[in-house]
Amino acid sequence: MSKLSLREVSCAFGDTLAVDRISLDIAEGEFVSLLGPSGCGKTTTLRMIAGFIRPTHGTIAVGGRVLSTPESSLPPERRGMSMIFQSYAIWPNMTVAENVGFGLAIRGLGASEVRAQVDRMLGVVRLGDLRERYPAELSGGQQQRVALGRAMVVNPEVLLLDEPLSNLDANLREEMRGEIRRLHEEFRYTTVYVTHDQAEAMATSDRIVVMNRGRIEQVADPFTLYNRPRTRFVAGFIGRTNFLAGRCNGGALHFAGFSLPAAPLTPRPEEGAPVLLSLRPQYLRLSGEAAPATAPWRLQGRILHRTYLGEQWDYLVEPAPGAAPLRVVAPPTAVHEVGASVRIEIDPAQVAVLEAGAD
């Protein structure tokens, strides 16, 4: 049985459908991120799980117990969940220790037990030497740790995080996403994490739910999501990619200016059907040698533009006269001049076949 279950859940605000009949099962101890652009419905979904918003259709259950329906909704304080907001919502007039222990105190635990659990949690989030400081005396990352400690110390059934790193600078975000994953490995709370940052979702999650226009586009682990996206939207939202749109005829894939054999692809496109491929820039290879006529997944192209980024070259390559250019990421030692003729090598095992027409 899943720990958290959403069944055909929708949420409308007047005539605006923010969430459109999504279904999702999250296992005990699983870390799942809701990922998507602004307005895709991810935060509305999280707030329905927390009990702040009632669904207009469907049910939300935890451990088989229904918490939300269109007719009734258990209030947030009775759901056994903890939520961390973008603003952290820690009390400025309380010390670090008092903030972390607040949830335990209102549950009626004795002072000695509260202190013992707070001391343990402060050690876990690495704030033991800051226990008597106030929030104004802490950095953004330290405030985030306070919020994490306060949310986890009460041993929630489900831990909810609403874009908790959005107020931090880039270096601190990278550090904190590693910290969040470390804490999850230690406590294994069932966790739902909302973010619009693909790197955050990839670094922290067991599975990622990609949302678009209130619907779920795809649910998968980070590796599968990146390498085997199902739709054009997912392929374009999770990292950079090249799209090739064409048609399958006579066992070949025909694109503007060139063709490729269909046989190596999985799944193989249907004969006579339109085809849409995703080719990640780092999975393409460039060489100064001419492409042999017998090499089916090699093309002869021309360098249109290049950008040196220190750790890599970013090339724009024309695979055939008049064809849409391809982006290729190459190591810093792979130097090709603008205008040079190059061989483009494509590994068909790294090509994702998308649902044609899906965006």
Image (cartoon, grey):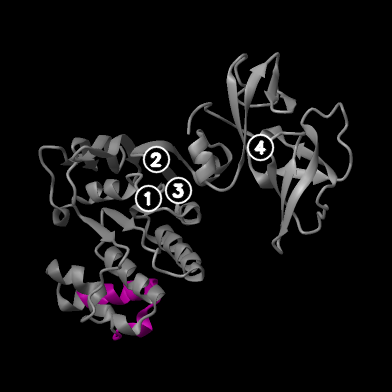
Q: Within the magenta stretch, is there residue 119?
A: yes
Where is residue 103 drawn, in percent x and y?
19, 68
Q: Secondary structure at mark 4?
A: helix
Three-letter amino acid code at the position of disc 3: Asp
Query: Where residue 350 is drawn, which disc sits there?
Result: 4
> Which kind of residue does numbered mark 4 sit on?
Gln
Return the disc, 3 or 1, that comes first in the chain's sequence: 1
Sequence order check, earlier mark of 1 and 2 = 1
Quickly name the residue at label 1.
Answer: 38
Q: Residues within 10 Å of mark 3 (few under 14, many from 20)?
A: some
Residues at marks 1 and 4, CA–CA distance in whole angstroms: 30 Å
Q: Nearer the viewer, mark 3 or mark 2?
A: 2
Q: Is residue 343 visible?
A: yes
Question: Would you say the residues marked 1 and 4 are in contact, meaning their CB atoms lie under 8 Å apart?
Answer: no
State left or right for residue 333 relative to residue 82.
right
Q: For the residues carrying marks 1 and 4, which lies nearer the camera in this image?
A: 1
Label 4: how many Cα within 10 Å (few below 14, some 14–19, many 20+):
some
In the drawing, what numbered circle is on residue 212?
A: 2
Q: Nearer the viewer, residue 79 or 38?
A: 38
In the shown orientation, is residue 72 left or right of residue 31?
A: left
Q: Is residue 262 visible?
A: no
For disc 2, the neighbor class at 10 Å (few under 14, some 14 to 19, many from 20) is many
The range drawn in magenta is 114-133
Given this view, does label 3 or label 1 mark the residue nearer the observer?
Answer: 1
